[in-house]
C-alpha cells in the first residue's frame, strides 16, 4: 500500500496531488507533458523533496513534512526507472542488473540476473555495455535492474515509450505476471492508452 | 687526533659536512684526501648558506658546517647550535670579475664596467650571498655602484652568476675565484675593496660524531688541505 | 614598503595565464579530439616541463632563447627584441611551467563532453570551429576554469625558472615569489611572512573572482 | 654511474603519488559534493601551496615539522620518529606541492558526473560510500587519472621544498631532480643532460603505463 | 528525394537495407528494438559511416563507398532529432532553436523561433534551460530545432515516444502540415501504429 500526498512549486508551475495504490495494484499517472508526473515519482523515490505532504508505504511513513520525517532513498526499497534509462555506462548489462541485489553469492546473483534478462530476450546482451544497446534495449535493462532488488514499490517513468509494439505487448504480459507475483504497488507514468487498459487498475489524472 | 678516531669502526662512519656552494670544487677534493687518510666516508651537502643555517637549526643530521660568512656561524653559536670553541678561520675567499670573451668586450679594470656595451653585470644576491655582498662592497668602494646599479642582475648564488656570464647573457659578472676554470677570462678584484671573506668552519653541537668532526676541521687546516685551498684561489690566514 | 614586486607578479601572472589558457586549450583540444600516430607519447611529452627542477628548466631556456642562442640572435639582431633579464622572459618561463597543468585539465574536460551534442550541431550545419566555441568549450568550461586556476597559481609561485631567465632585478624582474625567496634566504623572516600573506591574499582574491565569474556565466 | 638518485626518485614519487591520490580524491569529493560555509575560500586555500616558491614552502614545512617545532618534538621525543632529512620528508614535501593539482582535477571531474546515475544507485539501496566507489569514482576516472599524472610528474620534479626538508644527502635523500640541480650548479652539463634524459624517460614510461592501464580498464 | 542503400556490421549484428522516399513523402522505419533503425538514420545524417552502400538526396550523392564520396554532416542539410533529445544543456530553449538558423538578423531569428515554439505550446518556456523541462517538452524543442534550419531531409528517431496522446495527436497534425509545406522527405522511426497510419506514406520494415 502506497499513499501519496504532495505539493511542489516551481516559479511557473505547481502540483498538488493525492492518491493511493494497494499491493498488487497498478496506478497509472496520466496527463499532459509537463504536468508533474516525473516530479511526483521522484518525490516518492526520495530524490527530490516535496514542499508539503506525506508519503506512506505499508503504513510506514517514509516522508512527512510536518513530522519532519524523511527516510533517505537508499532505505525506501523502491524500484525506480527514470525517464532516460539511467544505466551505468561503465558497467556491463549483467553488472547493471546485479548492482542492487542484496545476495552475498555472486553466482546466485548472476543466475538471477540472467533469468531476468531472458524474460526480455536480452540474455545474449549480458556482456555488452549500455552504449552498445539500442534505445529499447537500454530501457528493458533498466526495468529489470529495478525489479532485481525486490522493491516494495515500483516506479516506472514511461517505461515502454522506446519499445516497439510487439516487444511492448509481450513485456506488458510478462510484467503483469511479475506484478501479481510480487504483489507490490506499481506506479506507471505512461502516455499509452493500451498500457492503461492492460496494466492499470487505477488512474491518477495529471 | 688520528689516534682517537682509530678506536671506532671507521668503515661504518659517515661524516656529514654542509658547505656553501662556492666551496664545492675545493671541498670535494679535500674530502677525497680526508677519506683516504681516515678511511671513513665524507658526505657533502652544498647549498646556500642561509638554507643550510635553517636546516641546522631544525635538526639536520650535519656534523660540520662551513658557511661562506662569519655572521651565520655567530648566529648559530648564539643559539647553541655550533660549539663555540670549534669555530675556526681556515681560508679567505677572493672575488673576480669574469668576462665572456665570445662577446668581444674587453674589460681591463672595474672602471670599464661603465662602458655602454656592457648592459648586464651578474652578481650573487648581496642580501643573502656573502660573495655577492663583497661584490657590491667592492663596487661601492670603487665609486662605481651608483653609476652601474641599473645594469646589475642578481643571481641566486655565485654559481648562477657565473652561468649568466658563461651563457653570454651577461657580458660580465663577479663570482668566486674558486669557481674559475682555466678557460675563463677573469680579473682578480683587489681584496682591499671589500670586507674579508672569512671562511669559518665549526662543529654542530647536536652532532653525535664530534670526534670525527674535529678530525675534519683539523684536516682542513693541515698542509695537505692548504695546498688544495690555494690551488682553488683561497688565501690562507 | 616597495610594492613593485606585487605589481610585477600580477602583471606576469596575468599575461602568462592568458597565453597559457589559449595555447593550453588548443593543445588540449588536439589531444582530446584528434587521432594521430605517437599521440600518447606526445601527451606524455607535454608533461615534461613539470618533471624538471624549474632552475634547470630555466637553464635550458636560457641557452635556448639567450643572447648566444640561434633564437636569441634572431630576436636581438633582426627584430631588436631583448627578452633575457626582462619581465617578458618571466612570462615565457611561467607559460612553460604552467602549460602542462592547463593542457591536462582541458584535455580531460573536453573528453568528457557528450559527443552526440557535437554531432547534433554538425547536422545543424555548424563548422567545426563554431562547434568548438559554442558547444565543446562551454560544456568543458568547468575543467577549463580549473586549469586556468592552476595555471594562475602556478605562475604566481614561479620562481626557479624565472630567476634564471629574468634575473632578479629589483623593480624590473623581481617578482613577489623571488622577493619572498630573498627574504627567507636573508633571514628576514618577518618580511617573508608579510610577503607570503600578501601573495596568498592576492591569489585567493583572484581565485574567488574567477569562481564568481564562472558562477554568473552559468545562468 | 650512481643509480641511487633514480631509485630514490621513483620511490619518493610513488609513495607521494599514492598518498596524494587518496587525500586528493577525498578533498576533491568534498569540494564537489558538499555544501558548507566558506567553501569557495577553502577551495582557494587548498591551491595556496602552488603559489609559494617551493623553497619557501620547504622553509615553513621545516619549522613546522622540524626538531624545534611542537609536532617535531612529539614525533622525535614521544614516538622516536625522525622525519627531517630522511626520504620520508621528501615524500611529505612532494605530497604538499602536488596535492593542489590532484584536488582540482578530482573536483572538476566529479562535478561533471551525471547526478541521476547517483540517484538511481541510491534507490537501489546503496550507501553513499558504495555509490562513491562504484559510480562516482569510475565515472570521474578520466579526470582522476589526469590528476594522478600531474601529481606524479610534479613529484618527480619536486626539488625546492625537498631540498629544504630532506637535504641533499647522496644515497639517502638526493633525488634525481636534486642531482640534476647539483650537476647544473656545478657546471657538469653533460651529466646534467644525461640525468635530464633519464628523468624524462622514466616519466614518459610511467605516464604511458598509467595511460595503458587506464585504457584497459575501460573495456 | 532520398535514396538509401547501406550495409553495416557489428560483431553480432548486421543490417543491409535499401529504400527511397520522395519529397513530401514520409517513410516510417518500423521494426523491433535493436534492428538497426537508429544506425540507419545516423548514417544518413553522416554521423556514422556505413560499411557499404550509397546515400543520395535530390540526385546528389552525399555518400558513396565505391566512389569515395562522403559529404560532412554540416553540408548535408539534414534535420536530425536523436533518440535522447540532444538539447544543448548550456543554452536556453530559444537559443537551442536559433542555433542552426542561417539568417543574419538576430531579431528575425528570435521571431521565427517563437513562432515555432508556439506551434508546440512552448513559447512560455523559451527562457528555460533544458534541465528545467519535462521529457516531452525536451523532445518537442528538439524537433523544432531541427525544423528551424529548413533542412532538405528530416530524420526523426522516435520523436513522439515521450509525448502524451493529446499532445501527440495535435503535433501529428501540425507536423503533417509542416511536411506538406516543406515538401521534403521525412524519415520517421516509430513504434506507434498510429504514427504510421496518420503520417507515413511508406513503411520500411526492419
Ligand atoms: N528544476 C526545475 N526548475 C524549474 N522548473 C522545473 C524544474 N524541474 C521541472 N520543472 C517544471 O515542472 C513541470 C513538471 O515537470 P515533470 O518533469 O514532472 O513533467 P512530466 O509530467 O513528467 O512531463 P513529461 O510527460 O513530458 O515527462 C514542468 O513544467 C517543468 O518545466
Ligand atoms: N557501437 C556498437 N557496438 C556494437 N554493437 C552496436 C553498437 N551500436 C549499436 N550496436 C548494435 O546494433 C543494433 C542496432 O542498434 P540501433 O540503435 O540501430 O537499434 P534500433 O533499431 O534503433 O532500436 P531501438 O528501437 O530500440 O532504438 C543493436 O543490436 C545494438 O546492439
Ligand atoms: O656560496 Mo654563496 O652562499 O652563494 O656566497
Ligand atoms: Mg516526465
Ligand atoms: Mg534506436
Image (spheres, coloured by chain):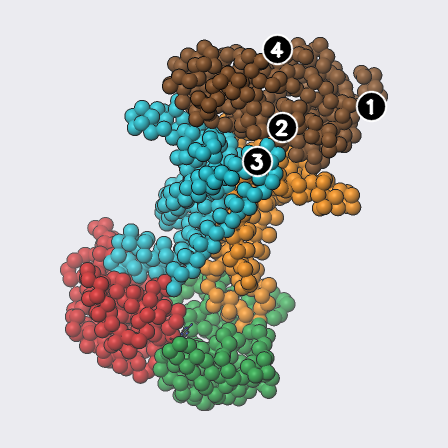
Chain colours: A green, B brown, C cyan, D orange, E red
Residue receiving disc 4: B231
Give percent across and percent down for residue A159: 42, 76
Residue receiving disc 1: B8
Callout 3 touching callout 1 (CB < 8 Å): no
Give whichever of C93, E184 is nearer the camera. Answer: C93
Could you tell me which secondary element the residue under label 2 belongs to?
A: helix
Residue receiving disc 3: C183
Closer to us: mark 4 or mark 1? Answer: 4
Q: Chain of mark 3?
A: C
Callout 1 touching callout 2 (CB < 8 Å): no
Give percent across and percent down for residue C6: 47, 41
Q: Quadrant of the C terminus of chain C?
A: bottom left
Disc 3/disc 1 C-alpha distance (Å): 43 Å
Residue at image position (50%, 31%) is C56
User: Looking at the picture, does residue C198 appear above or below residue D179?
Assistant: below
Label 1, residues with CA under 10 Å away: few <14, some 14-19, many ≥20: few
User: Looking at the picture, does residue E162 appear above or below residue D149?
Assistant: below
Could you tell me which secondary element the residue under label 3 belongs to?
A: helix
Q: In this rendering, do the residues under marks 2 and 4 share a single chain? A: yes
Q: Chain of mark 2?
A: B
Residue receiving disc 2: B49
Amino acid at each position: 500500500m502506497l499513499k501519496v500526498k504532495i505539493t511542489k512549486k516551481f516559479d511557473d508551475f505547481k502540483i498538488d496531488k493525492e492518491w493511493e495504490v494497494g499491493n498488487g495494484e497498478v496506478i497509472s499517472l496520466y496527463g499532459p507533458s509537463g504536468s508533474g508526473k516525473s516530479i511526483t515519482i521522484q518525490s516518492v523515490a526520495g530524490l527530490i523533496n516535496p514542499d508539503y505532504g506525506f508519503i506512506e508505504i505499508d503504513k510506514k511513513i517514509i516522508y512527512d513534512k510536518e513530522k519532519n520525517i524523511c527516510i533517505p532513498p537508499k532505505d525506501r526499497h523502491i524500484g525506480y526507472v527514470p525517464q532516460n534509462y539511467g544505466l551505468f555506462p561503465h558497467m556491463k548489462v549483467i553488472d547493471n542488473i546485479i548492482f542492487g541485489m542484496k545476495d552475498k553469492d555472486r553466482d546466485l546473483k548472476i543466475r538471477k540476473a540472467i533469468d531476468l534478462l531472458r524474460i526480455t530476450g536480452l540474455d545474449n546482451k549480458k556482456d555488452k555495455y549500455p552504449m552498445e544497446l539500442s534505445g529499447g534495449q537500454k530501457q528493458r535493462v533498466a526495468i529489470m535492474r529495478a525489479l532485481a532488488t525486490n522493491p516494495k514499490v515500483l516506479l516506472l517513468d514511461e517505461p515502454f515509450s522506446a519499445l516497439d509494439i510487439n516487444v511492448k505487448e509481450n513485456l506488458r504480459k510478462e510484467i503483469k505476471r511479475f506484478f501479481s507475483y510480487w504483489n507490490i504497488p506499481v506506479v506507471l507514468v505512461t502516455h499509452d492508452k493500451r498500457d492503461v487498459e492492460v496494466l492499470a487498475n487505477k488512474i491518477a489524472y495529471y | 687526533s688520528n689516534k682517537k678516531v682509530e678506536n671506532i669502526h671507521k668503515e661504518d662512519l659517515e661524516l656529514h659536512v654542509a658547505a656553501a656552494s662556492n666551496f664545492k670544487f675545493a671541498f670535494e677534493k679535500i674530502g677525497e684526501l680526508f677519506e683516504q687518510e681516515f678511511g671513513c666516508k665524507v658526505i657533502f651537502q652544498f647549498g646556500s648558506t642561509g638554507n643550510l643555517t635553517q636546516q641546522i637549526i631544525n635538526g639536520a643530521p650535519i656534523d660540520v658546517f662551513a658557511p661562506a660568512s662569519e655572521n651565520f656561524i655567530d648566529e648559530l653559536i648564539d643559539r647553541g647550535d655550533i660549539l663555540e670553541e670549534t669555530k675556526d678561520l681556515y681560508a679567505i675567499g677572493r672575488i673576480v670579475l669574469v668576462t665572456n670573451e665570445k662577446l668581444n668586450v674587453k674589460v681591463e679594470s672595474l672602471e670599464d664596467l661603465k662602458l655602454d656595451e656592457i648592459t648586464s653585470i651578474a652578481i650573487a644576491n648581496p642580501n643573502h650571498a656573502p660573495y655577492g655582498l663583497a661584490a657590491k662592497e667592492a663596487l661601492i668602494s670603487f665609486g662605481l655602484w651608483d653609476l652601474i646599479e641599473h645594469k646589475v642582475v642578481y643571481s641566486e648564488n655565485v654559481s648562477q652568476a657565473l652561468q649568466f656570464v658563461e651563457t653570454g647573457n651577461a657580458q660580465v659578472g663577479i663570482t668566486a675565484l674558486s669557481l674559475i676554470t682555466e678557460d675563463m677570462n677573469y680579473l682578480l678584484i683587489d681584496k682591499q675593496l671589500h670586507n674579508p671573506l672569512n671562511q669559518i668552519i665549526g662543529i654542530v653541537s647536536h652532532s653525535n660524531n664530534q670526534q670525527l668532526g674535529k678530525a675534519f676541521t683539523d684536516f682542513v687546516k693541515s698542509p695537505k688541505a692548504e695546498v688544495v685551498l690555494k690551488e682553488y684561489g683561497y688565501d690562507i690566514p | 614598503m616597495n610594492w613593485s614586486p606585487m605589481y610585477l607578479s600580477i602583471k606576469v601572472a596575468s599575461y602568462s595565464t592568458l597565453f597559457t589558457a589559449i595555447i593550453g586549450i588548443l593543445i588540449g583540444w588536439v589531444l582530446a579530439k584528434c587521432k594521430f600516430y605517437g599521440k600518447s607519447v606526445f601527451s606524455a611529452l607535454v608533461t615534461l616541463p613539470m618533471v624538471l627542477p624549474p632552475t634547470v628548466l630555466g637553464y635550458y631556456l636560457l641557452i635556448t632563447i639567450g643572447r648566444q642562442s640561434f633564437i636569441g640572435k634572431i630576436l636581438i639582431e633582426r627584430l631588436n627584441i631583448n627578452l633575457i633579464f626582462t619581465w617578458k622572459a618571466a612570462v615565457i618561463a611561467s607559460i612553460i611551467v604552467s602549460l602542462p597543468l592547463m593542457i591536462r585539465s582541458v584535455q580531460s574536460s573536453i573528453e568528457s563532453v557528450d559527443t552526440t551534442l557535437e554531432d547534433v550541431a554538425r547536422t545543424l550545419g555548424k563548422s567545426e570551429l563554431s562547434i568548438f566555441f559554442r558547444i565543446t568549450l562551454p560544456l568543458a568550461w568547468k575543467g577549463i576554469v580549473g586549469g586556468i586556476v592552476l595555471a594562475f597559481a602556478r605562475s604566481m609561485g614561479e620562481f626557479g625558472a624565472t630567476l634564471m631567465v629574468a634575473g632578479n632585478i629589483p623593480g624590473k624582474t623581481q617578482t613577489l615569489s623571488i622577493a619572498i625567496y630573498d627574504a627567507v634566504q636573508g633571514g628576514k623572516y618577518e618580511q617573508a611572512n608579510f610577503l607570503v600573506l600578501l601573495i596568498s591574499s592576492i591569489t585567493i582574491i583572484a581565485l574567488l573572482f574567477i569562481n564568481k565569474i564562472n558562477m554568473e556565466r552559468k545562468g
